[in-house]
Image (cartoon, coloured by chain):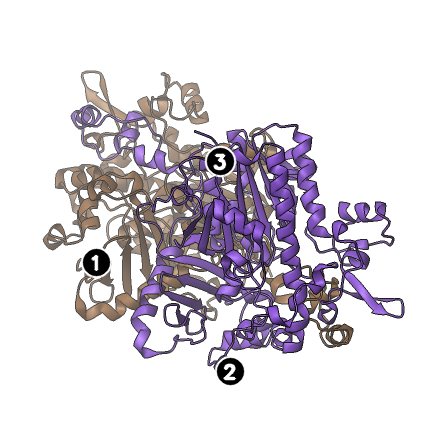
Chain colours: A brown, B purple
Amino acid sequence: MSEVRNVLFIMCDQLRYDYLSCYGHPHLHTPHLDQLAARGTRFTNAYVQSPVCGPSRMSTYTGRYVLSHGSVYNGYPLRVGELTLGDHLRPLGIDTVLIGKTHMRADVEGMERYGIPPDSIIGARLSECGFDVFERDDGLHPDSGYVPDPAYNSYLRERGYDGANPWHSAANSVAAGEGESGSGWFLKYSNRPALIAEEDSETPYLTRRFMDFVDARQGKDGWLCHLSFIKPHWPYIVPAPYNTMYGPETWLPPVRDRAERETSHPVFAAFQNSRAARTFSRDDVRETVLPAYMGLIKQIDDQMGLLFAFLKARGLWDRTMIVFTSDHGDYMGDHWLGEKDMFHDPSVKVPLIIHDPRRGVIRGQVCDALVEAIDLAPTFVEVFGGVPARNRLEGRSLSPLLAGRMPDAWRTVAFSEYDYAWMSARQALGRDVDECKIIMARDTRWKLIFCEGFRPMLFDLETDPQELRDLGDDPRYSDVRFRLEAEIFAWARRQRQRITVSDEKVAASRESDAARAGIFIGFWDEAERDECLKDDPGPQNET
Amino acid sequence: MSEVRNVLFIMCDQLRYDYLSCYGHPHLHTPHLDQLAARGTRFTNAYVQSPVCGPSRMSTYTGRYVLSHGSVYNGYPLRVGELTLGDHLRPLGIDTVLIGKTHMRADVEGMERYGIPPDSIIGARLSECGFDVFERDDGLHPDSGYVPDPAYNSYLRERGYDGANPWHSAANSVAAGEGESGSGWFLKYSNRPALIAEEDSETPYLTRRFMDFVDARQGKDGWLCHLSFIKPHWPYIVPAPYNTMYGPETWLPPVRDRAERETSHPVFAAFQNSRAARTFSRDDVRETVLPAYMGLIKQIDDQMGLLFAFLKARGLWDRTMIVFTSDHGDYMGDHWLGEKDMFHDPSVKVPLIIHDPRRGVIRGQVCDALVEAIDLAPTFVEVFGGVPARNRLEGRSLSPLLAGRMPDAWRTVAFSEYDYAWMSARQALGRDVDECKIIMARDTRWKLIFCEGFRPMLFDLETDPQELRDLGDDPRYSDVRFRLEAEIFAWARRQRQRITVSDEKVAASRESDAARAGIFIGFWDEAERDECLKDDPGPQNET
């Protein structure tokens, strides 16, 4: 039977799960991704471990919850000592390569502490979240020089786009009249075309970079390539013709209810008061941004068509697993919120489509099991013939689900975390930096949002799938809240740092191991020792 | 006012809190330690973070709970990336030095992963839990060669004790008749004198090694020396005359109740069935071991007398903080248990005496505040003029308590953890390796023992200070159990891996920081940007 020789791990940034036609969008047609779903498995309950780029990605790349790796917000260096995809896959002989965004911030202080030169191979991988970098591009290149001049800028200059930072002046700006240009950061410009030819914009550029990577390998298998697109993330700007494809007849109304405005929940209220929330609660803003957001997604789907054709042309289709997902969603005005950051499905649920070329897997399968982004790392390890380390990887391989089998004791609750310590909500609520944790526990029917220092929020996804009625203070559901808080308690106390000794070694240990090493604890005399060593054989194990 | 220039951090191994006369033992007189207490502060509610050597020490040296550092049992390498005393004190110009035991196991795999040579300074410190080693000696040197020939063996051979391993054949063996020798590992020999002169035994040897260290510094201040004794830990063997000092009239009866034998608690029952528990439940064993255990403690106190006199003779007394404690206790047959491992006070409570030479501190103070071993690391940082990093150190400085002030919001609950996955109890109870966690939460009146998969145990320390009546299944105390389980929940979900960004940096962040970096999220137009940058000045902060 065929085997998986390579993995193409595609991630979009800020792509809502429900803005693809295979996920039910009535007007945004994404035939190429629909085709992928028709040939593979489409997961309808895939959750990221945090609804914001940095922590979500660190969880995906480490296979561990945010509470475990500690990179709780954008810009938090991932501590030296956390293992990433590369650490798990390289021992299996797999090249683990990055093209695009990771949002990784290097733990420079930790590397200094241990004398790891940033320009060494180890240092470079540590700095890039375990990946070997074919091209890193986080897609945020403001003129402040926040990020050094990226390779994409050099490409644009070669193509004749002048200026110190064509990423901004061309790819993410628009014409604002009288020869003026307007910055794509400002939402009022979102429905105008970017000042760049479509083929030179970020999504096609990164897609071609992947093709360059494949051709550079000259047919050599044994790679996982993380093709990590920047869009449809901010700035919401797309080149023609995509900016004019989606008019009013294609817009879905915002999912929101007046009652949410009068929420009694301080955290939800504070989030509704954030700048992006206030802005996206305005219909004029939403209706200016939607054409760009939908156009950016359509552009991605078109690029997927080219990419899949390329894989087939290169003969890679039948031995390459393709994973398509996102790091989080986008409220786009739903629930009176913008951006992401909270735990309603538009923000925390993501599309997840996996095409597994192996025979024996189900084609065109829809899987509604609760899966988490941390399940991908162990899936990759298993796909490449390894055994996921239970004491290090907190997710579970999806392979059985891809084959249509529901594994024993599959999770009944999915968890996600967010820390609003960096947001204005912290000051607004007068919280200390360690008191801003919110945790989602979502089972097959209910979604509880645990809020440090406040009552929880609760939604009944069966009777209220749009999550408009917060039952967090309804006495009729105290038992549901109690049960899900108990789930969070069990999740929080698990031993997630016990990473230096394998479960197998612990399981193989015997009390007689110490005695075998000559350490006799609790023995009255030599006779008891002889009896013990006779009765309890076992592998020698230091204690 | 005088300052602390040095810290002498003395730790005994397996010393019960109540086997010193200043802690109330009626027959075991320890005048030198009593003197230290009379000049300093004696803590009556000091708890270790795990009642077993390895994890207890890793918590003390990192200033973090076991759930945070992950070294859950003896022999668990401390993961690369965990900061230790040395990492916190060296930036303050303090030499952090070890003499004696740490029970540290190096994370060899992690060091390899990051290319850290074990013989480099960084590698050596990582391997030794952050200490610079003056002399490492864990005190367990069975003939199996479990540990390479220690310096102490060379010393003994110089002193004329022949043999491949005089640590065992001389310091920890006894005469067994007909020219035969008996191994000190076997309890039946415990009341016989070790085959070694008192001054050559381990406690005086390590005390002199500390004196060597001081003289080698030639008066240079700026050190923390961890003088870490091996005794009164196994093997329970002491040289003459100490082995004959404590007869039946000095023995305290075991603290135990028939009812404990019929406990309905599976974990407590399984622990009672361990080898050491079965052995120490026998009076003949207890009465053979007590003379050695008490003699070893008396020997330590005598050495403290010599050590304190030495510090005064060297003029160090008035500028050296002295901390005396233990890594855990010893059941010595109480509660039908031997060794440690469980959470009754004889096992998990330790003596803690701190002599602070600074003026303004209270002399002869008894402090009953709930303190934890993880409070020592931040205390040392503060004493040497540093500011404890709240995002890394989970304890709190004891300095205010030493000055007689109870800080605001001091902890109301002390926590300790144990993982019995390596013990026969795991097989006996049929638990998976990740299902063997037990957690103590002790407030000012109650002690709850949370047991993964079983009901908790509960003791009322006010009406039952000897912890003989388990109220864990008594319906009258369900509210107490609920409250303490809620405390464990709050403790378990704290963000203990958020170590790469300081609380101060988080607190200083403003939502406008991103805008200052040129990243405009949620802005409709340029006017909103200008307004934001005008209204909200703040330090620039990347997001």
Q: Which residue is mark 3?
A: A107
* Alpha carbon distance from label 2 to label 3: 56 Å
The chain containing the residue under callout 1 comes to A
Residue A398 visible, this orientation: no
Disc 2 residue type?
Arg
Q: Where residue B152 appears, x then y in whole percent?
A: 76, 47
Residue that sits furthest to the right in the current view: B178
Between B62 and B399, the residue placed more toward the observer is B399
Residue at 32 percent of width and 26 percent of height: B540
In this rendered view, identify the residue nearer to me: B173 or B262.
Answer: B173
Q: Position of residue A402 (x, y in %)?
A: 47, 62
Which residue position holds label 1? A466
- Chain of the residue under the numbered disc 2 shown in the image: B
Q: Are marks 2 and 3 in contact (CB under 8 Å)?
A: no
Residue where numbered disc 2 is placed: B258
B116 displayed left or right of A289: right
